[in-house]
Image (cartoon, rainbow, N blue to C red):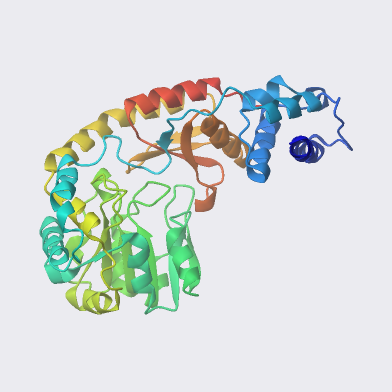
């Protein structure tokens, strides 16, 4: 036991020493050294706490590092444990999930169909396909249910050698393309997050993957620009995951005249079913038919199908979510804009907001410090926006937790 204790102390001291030397610009750090006298501030303390978590799996509250700046004292407190453990109930504002829970009729449908779990969804899948088609105003042959957006993208990548997609934008398209060894070309956005490439740039055998509204920027691309792209590109995948939160109509009316256009409809956001990994590809029958043949055997499970069937029938839940978003959006915007943490806050056409920090380092520090207080938000570095943080529009209780956590933050 003594050997294990000594080994842990050595490991903690090594991490503290490494971070101090790298960030404080000192040659060495001893056990009696006071890190604050050497230049420790809250940002460097955050880096130290993150390093301890990543290298040793030890959660260290930021306050512990700041209150125990002497190296040996800090090592002892970390080793003995601190009574300020992270909150057991985290506030999740990082994945844009429903703040009012799942649709009650989806839950009821799951319970009703639980007795059929020993069966393959041979009858349920075509039934739900018809219901999805009716909801979106298309024929059942125009709909293919998929195991989320990843399967949808995978099916389409089979016939293309390379794709074009925007940056900053949803990283999932490029990730799936890389898995399938497909080349990825970037469509750059300007400072208003609008595409700079003219539609004719995609004429010919081009496969273009877009989200409307875009994620993570949350804005709409000009409808005329999107329509012109669909007129010249060989394939256009248009992800309408966040469309219900916007003031834009769907591009579904174009499907009859543009067989190269395929829409993706999600049930994770506006339908409140992020836990049910089910989406729908919607396109011309001649485009969907070969994808149906290519899809894995029953890739969509009975539980997801049942929950979507219930959600489609629950118009009251969708209306309640829309009302909540209308009111909570303003409250979240006010809270973020009144905070001294952010240099800029932007509204979106989605169920999330964007806040810009002064530097990418600040963005990382803010994200981590909020997490240490039990509030999770999404840093957008992976999406190509290293200074920005994405904040879901959640419940009013979550807003209180976020506001309190922001008030406690101190940036250098």
Q: Nearer the viewer, residue 111 or 306?
A: 111
**Image: 235 above or below 121:** below
Q: Residue at x 52, y 34 (%)?
A: 371
Q: Which of 147 and 219 is in front in this view?
A: 147
Q: Which residue is drawn at 54% across and 48% down?
A: 381
Q: Residue at x 45, y 55 (%)?
A: 169
Quarter containing the N terminus: top right
- Quadrant of residue 292 within the rendered picture: bottom left
x and y, in percent, of residue 140 in the image: 13, 68
Using the rendered image of the protein, determine whether residue 110 is visible from the camera's viewpoint: yes
Quarter containing the C terminus: top right
**Image: 71 above or below 1:** above
**Image: 283 above or below 399:** below
x and y, in percent, of residue 226 in the image: 32, 61
- Quadrant of residue 284 within the rendered picture: bottom left
Q: Which residue lies furthest to the front in this view?
A: 1
């Amino acid at each position: 036991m003594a050997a294990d204790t000594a080994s842990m102390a050595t490991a903690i001291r090594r991490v503290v020493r490494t971070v101090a030397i790298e960030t404080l610009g000192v040659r060495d750090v001893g056990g009696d050294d006071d890190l604050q006298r050497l230049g420790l501030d809250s940002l460097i303390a955050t880096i130290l706490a993150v390093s301890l978590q990543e290298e040793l799996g030890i959660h260290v509250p930021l306050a512990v590092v700041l209150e125990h700046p002497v190296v040996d004292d800090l090592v002892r407190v970390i080793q003995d444990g601190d009574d300020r453990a992270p909150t057991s109930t985290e506030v999740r504002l990082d994945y844009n999930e429903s703040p009012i829970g799942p649709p009650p009729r989806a839950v009821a449908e799951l319970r009703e169909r639980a007795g059929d779990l020993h069966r393959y969804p041979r009858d349920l899948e075509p039934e739900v396909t018809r219901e999805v088609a009716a909801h979106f105003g298309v024929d059942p042959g125009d709909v293919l249910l998929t195991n989320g957006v990843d399967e949808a993208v995978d099916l389409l990548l089979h016939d293309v050698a390379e794709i074009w997609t925007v940056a900053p934008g949803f990283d999932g398209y490029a990730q799936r393309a890389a898995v399938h060894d497909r080349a990825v070309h970037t469509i750059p956005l300007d400072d208003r997050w609008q595409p700079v490439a003219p539609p004719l740039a995609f004429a010919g055998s081009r496969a273009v993957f877009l989200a409307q509204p875009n994620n993570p920027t949350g804005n709409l691309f000009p409808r005329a620009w999107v329509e012109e792209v669909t007129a010249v590109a060989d394939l256009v995948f248009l992800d309408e995951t966040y469309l219900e939160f916007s003031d834009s109509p769907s591009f579904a009316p174009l499907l009859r005249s543009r067989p190269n256009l395929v829409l993706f409809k999600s049930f994770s956001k506006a339908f409140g079913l992020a836990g049910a990994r089910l989406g729908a590809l919607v396109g011309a029958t001649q485009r969907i038919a070969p994808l149906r043949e290519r899809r894995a055997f029953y890739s969509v499970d009975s539980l997801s199908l049942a929950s979507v069937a219930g959600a489609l029938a629950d118009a009251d839940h969708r209306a309640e979510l829309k009302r909540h978003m209308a009111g909570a959006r303003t409250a979240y915007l006010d809270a973020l804009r009144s905070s001294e943490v952010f240099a800029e806050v932007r509204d979106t056409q989605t169920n999330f907001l964007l806040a810009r920090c002064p530097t990418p380092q600040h963005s990382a520090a803010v994200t981590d410090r909020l997490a240490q207080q039990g509030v999770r938000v999404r840093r957008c570095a992976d999406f190509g926006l290293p200074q920005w943080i994405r904040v879901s529009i959640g419940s009013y209780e979550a807003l209180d937790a976020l506001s309190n956590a922001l008030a406690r933050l101190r940036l250098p």
